[in-house]
Image: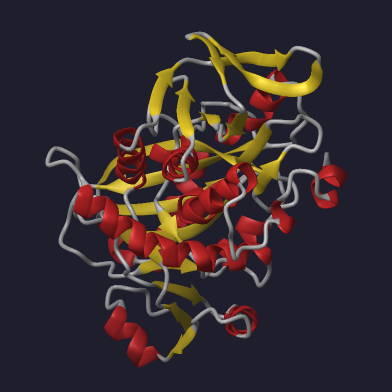
Amino acid sequence: MRVAVIGSGIVGAACALALVEGGAEVVVIDRVGVAGETSSRCEGNLLVSDKAPGAEADLAVASNAMWRVLAARLDAERPSCQPLTEFEAKGGIVVAFDGGEPALERFAEAQRATGIRAEAMDVAALTEAEPFLSREVVHAVHYPDDAQIQPSTATQALLDTAVRAGARLVIGEVTGALGRAGRPGRLSGVMTTAGPIEADVVVNCAGPWAGEVAARLGARLDIRPRRGVILVTTPMPQRVFHKVYDSDYVGAVGSGDAALQTSTVVESTPGGTVLIGSSRERVGFDDRPGVAPAAAIAAKAVRLFPFLEETLLLRSYFGFRPYAPDHLPVIGADPEIVGLVHATGHEGAGIGLAPATAELVVHAVLGAPTALDPTPFLPGRASLQETA
């Protein structure tokens, strides 16, 4: 089985590794290089805490468990010159200011009913866990299974492992489809700026560009870019010990509003910097975010951790995330083009969902068994078609 994987972000890299280890001959195609776009412009969240009960939460719980094994393997097998994945099972704390407690607790209670660990924290426990947190916080829930990874190095490790197992990386842009003579509507590979690449199956892992790639291959896929901004402080002694975010982050994740939305997410990195997010806005591929998102993020972060007001920023960066209008990833065979499989639409959850996504892709391409239910994520689902 010859498989062409379009995109070498974390989803494409995870799919490439799973496919090559499943016995496929794999070529990965990317126009800029490994982790050159979305996967190097995010926080590396591995979250279950922001998932409402349902299909995506089930996928997140399964993928979270997979990451614990996968990250340990990638670190153990890495060449001496390759950096660590920086996997940290630090846990997350979701907090609420005055008035937000009932909604936060209702959300956590619904999650507990599905098996997600969500532990209410009293003031004493919260102060011990996060001594620099604002005393305005009136309620918190601890999610011990939340974790973090360095997304760029993790992506590089996944693809490097895939290449060492036999996959091949081609730098080039997909420009069109190779058709199969006498078989209209069936792919036999892709045309690229590096030349034609024949394949029995093409896996579209192009992230925010997956809709455009699908169109070039003759398919219809409603994936839109959603821009997000992240701030990075200068290194400092550690003052943030978990992934801490305001409960309004959950609402922003699930919102379909195109206008700018910001919510507070704060966490430390092994290098001593503090990552501060997050923002969401649908502005196409506009690469001029201006200062409004950064200013709004900073103001909310200072309310959560007052010491940040006197902290210097090292830099800010932004990226585009693949947004599906019905808020579910798109994973599985295209309903119209035979030989085309999609794996995109994860928005800000692609890092966390990558291993489970790869398992579903191997199921779709090679028929490998899986305990995961692929049905809610199929590209032909009614909820995705209705929003197009």
Left or right: residue 119 compared with residue 86: right
Quadrant location, the N terminus: top right
Quadrant location, the C terminus: top right
Does 220 appear above or below 82?
above
Give the residue drawn at x 28%, y 56%.
73
148 and 238: which is toward the camera: 148
Q: How many marks?
A: 0
334 and 104: which is toward the camera: 334
Give the residue drawn at x 80%, y 38%.
335
Left or right: residue 304 compared with residue 270: right
Examine the image and state in which quarter residue 242 appears: bottom left
* Image x and y of residue 299, in percent: 44, 55
Does 177 appear above or below 301?
above
* Image x and y of residue 101, in percent: 58, 83
Examine the image and state in which quarter residue 52 appears: bottom right
* Residue 265 in view of the camera: yes
Left or right: residue 33 compared with residue 1: left
Give the residue drawn at x 58%, y 84%.
112
Left or right: residue 381 compared with residue 343: right
* Image x and y of residue 307, in percent: 28, 64
277 and 371: which is toward the camera: 371
Does 225 appear above or below 135?
above
Q: Residue furthest left?
A: 80
Say how the picture is coloured: secondary structure
369 and 279: which is toward the camera: 369
Give the residue drawn at x 45%, y 64%.
64
Does 175 appear above or below 340?
above
* Residue 148 in view of the camera: no
* Image x and y of residue 162, in percent: 36, 38
